[in-house]
Amino acid sequence: MRISFRSRLLLLFISLAGGVLLATLVAVSLATNKQAELTVERELAVSERVLGELLKRRGEQLEQAAQVLADDFGFREAVASGDQATLVSAMVNHGDRIGTQLMALYGVNGQELASTHQLSAGTDFSTLRGVRLIDGELFQLVTVPVRAPDVIAYATLGFVIDDQLADALKQLTNTDLTFFDSQGQQVLASSLAQPLQQELLAVAAQQNLNEWLVENELAGHLSTFNAVELLVSTSRSDATQAFQTLRTQYLGFGLATLLVALVLAIATARYFNQPLARLTQAAEALRRGRYDAPLKLQRQDEFGQLGATFDTMREAIAEREQRIVYQLEHDLLTGLPNRESFYKNLNERLKQQQNGVMLILNIMRFRALNDRLGQSFGDQVLQHVANRLKEVFATDCFVARLASDEFVVLCSHTGENAEEANFAANLEALQRTPWHVGEASYRLEFRAGTVRFPDYGAEVDVLLRRAQLAAQLARSEKQLLATYQQGSDESYLRRLQILQALPDAITNRKLQLHYQPKMDCASGRVIGAEALIRWQHEQLGVIRPDEFIPLAEQSGDILRVTRWVCQAALDQQQYWLEQGIDVQMSVNLSALDLQADDLVDFIANELQERHLVAKKLTLEVTESAVMADLEQAQQRLQELRQLGCKIALDDYGTGYASLAQLKHLPLDKLKLDQSFIRGLDTNESDRIIVQSTLTLAHQLALQTVAEGVEEKSAWQILQSMGCDTLQGYYFSRPMAAAEFEQWLLNEASKFQVESKVSSN
């Protein structure tokens, strides 16, 4: 459970105040309890001293009274003469005057002369004094000698100790006195209530006095006076009442202090929590991306300083956020909005169902310009183009840079063809204007494509693709501007479908191989076959190699295609050898195949696995494949040639291979492109090119292959020029393996006859 700072602060204050109060209360309780015990003990001790002092005073008073009696001449004379009546009269009168309850006169031999109470026999009357139990009553006694002049008798006087004396002492000391005889089970004098007196006798007999005192909340001291027990007791609650009151008052004071502390804690927590709450709210707003609400804590303390620092941080974050957003939505080089901003802007226009035109603009040969003159130069060109586009399309248009040299312009649609005409005029002006970079002046060419929205698409990607298709059309037709027309992206969609279907076709072997025969030019005999790939798709129909091979090269699937073609062609060659058909097998390699490090090992393993001779395999590569990486191609072709394979350069004359490069390539055969062969009988230039190429090839010890032979006249011309091998529709189109075998049985022999006729 989450506890707020304010609640924690309140709990802290209350805990501290409560802890201090509790500790103090415990200390006070311990101190007051101890002091109460001391007070009780002190009261008991004081009561005992008061009792002792009282008994002492009474004893002195009694002794003085007894001495007065003993010194009375008449009394002494009566004692000496034995006048019993006079003795009794004098003792009675004197006892009444001083208030004694016991008077006795004994001779020196212990003979009773006169007495109000019967004393115990054998008592030494000369020492009879103090507290004594006589006839079931408790007396304080004094004894004085009667001299005439020698001791002739002993006079004993005594005050009774009763409940009245105990009550009087209680009034003085606030303690109870109890004289009792535990043996005789008799309370002699006590200020206790009658029930407590009876309980005291019972517990005294059982020696449970301390437990009884605790049960009745009493404190007491027990002492003995001549076989008589004295209990001085007091009520603990009465003795400690002042301390209980003090504790109660302190508890009330503590609760009041705690209440005040609670109020102060609430005020303090609010004092501290209010700025923290505002800081929390400001931080939450900051987290949600709101940077427009200043905190402004009007305080002169650390919280005020923290608030000022927070505001500074908020402003810095807001500035940095704006900078980041700007960088996210703008191209850092040109300052134009980037692809993200373009998507956002066009999506907003499409949501609002606005009509408009999108223009895609590319700089022609920008990469070559960048490579020749450096990236810094290219960056300056892009900046100039961006600035010019912002000037040209400044009104109601959105200009952005998509990538590299590609720019996009969005304009509102106001008329039927106004935007296209305006675009064309602006682009014409851009292209005519010289571009000054540094101290030099350059001219740039542009290609652009336009598409209307939402007429030709309600999605950004669709519109962007169609505008780019229009720009590609402008490049292919060497126009400055082209407009997207309905249905012009069908070829793009077909290419996309081919790319998506190609991996499945390779994996599930939905591709097929057809074989076109290769003929010996001189004899008309079949000497080989070129494996050509074919693809029949369920939905797309027949997919020509010139459609999917370039796509496979772009996607990287060409490596898997080539491996499959090699395996299928070698399987067929092995089968034909087993059937007695011995032909040279030709397979085409791409530029990516030549860059694969494991190509040679793959070819070697496939040949070894089928027990085929490497020289019966011809690997054909185009000029463009070789020139993609000339050094790498030379090394890979050399390795294949060392393996024993024959190497043929296909489509010679259409690529970029120079005579110097041709000299260093490890080649066995040279294939002339069909574009030179088809016009041999009508085009003198083609005949010159073919003748010179054949002569050059033979001088370089290369076999020659002419593809595209479609007429007998072309065969005859090539035969006269000394060409080695022919290939074309005049002999046969590419056929499936079964058709190829049937053609060999039924058709191939007639070309040998024709060759003999031509030679004759």
Image (cartoon, rainbow, N blue to C red):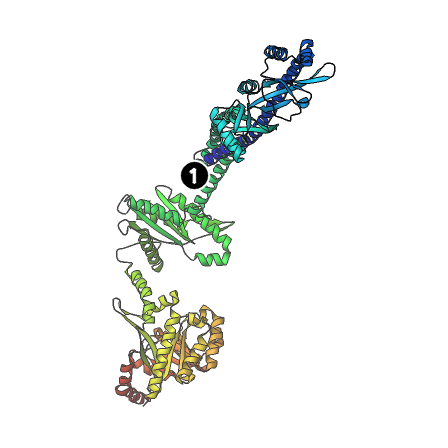
For the N terminus, give its image quadrant.
top left
Q: Estimate the x, y position of residue 491 in percent, counting from the top left.
A: 29, 62
Instruction: Report which residue position mark 1 lands on.
Output: 284
Q: Is residue 663 visible?
A: yes
Q: Residues within 10 Å of mark 1 (few under 14, many from 20)?
A: few
Q: Residue furthest top?
A: 74
**Residue in front for this viewpoint, 72 or 721:** 72
Q: Residue at x 27, y 47 (%)?
A: 417
Camera-side residue of 424 and 124: 124
Q: Position of residue 408 (x, y in %)?
A: 37, 50
303 left or right, relative to 566: right
**Local SS, label 1:** helix
599 relative to 488 in the view: left or right? right
User: Label 1 amino acid?
Assistant: Glu
The count of marks equals: 1
Residue 53: x percent and y percent? 63, 20
Q: Nearer the viewer, residue 30 or 458?
A: 30
Vertical comparison of 488 with 646: above or below:
above
Q: Is residue 336 above or below residue 714?
A: above
Quadrant showing the C terminus = bottom left
* Nearest the eye: 72 or 235: 72
Report which quarter residue 623 is drawn in: bottom left
Residue at coordinates 64% horizontally, 27% vertically from top-left?
Answer: 122
* Residue 715, position as x, y percentages in the image: 32, 82
Whether residue 94 is situated above or below residue 12 in the rendered picture: above
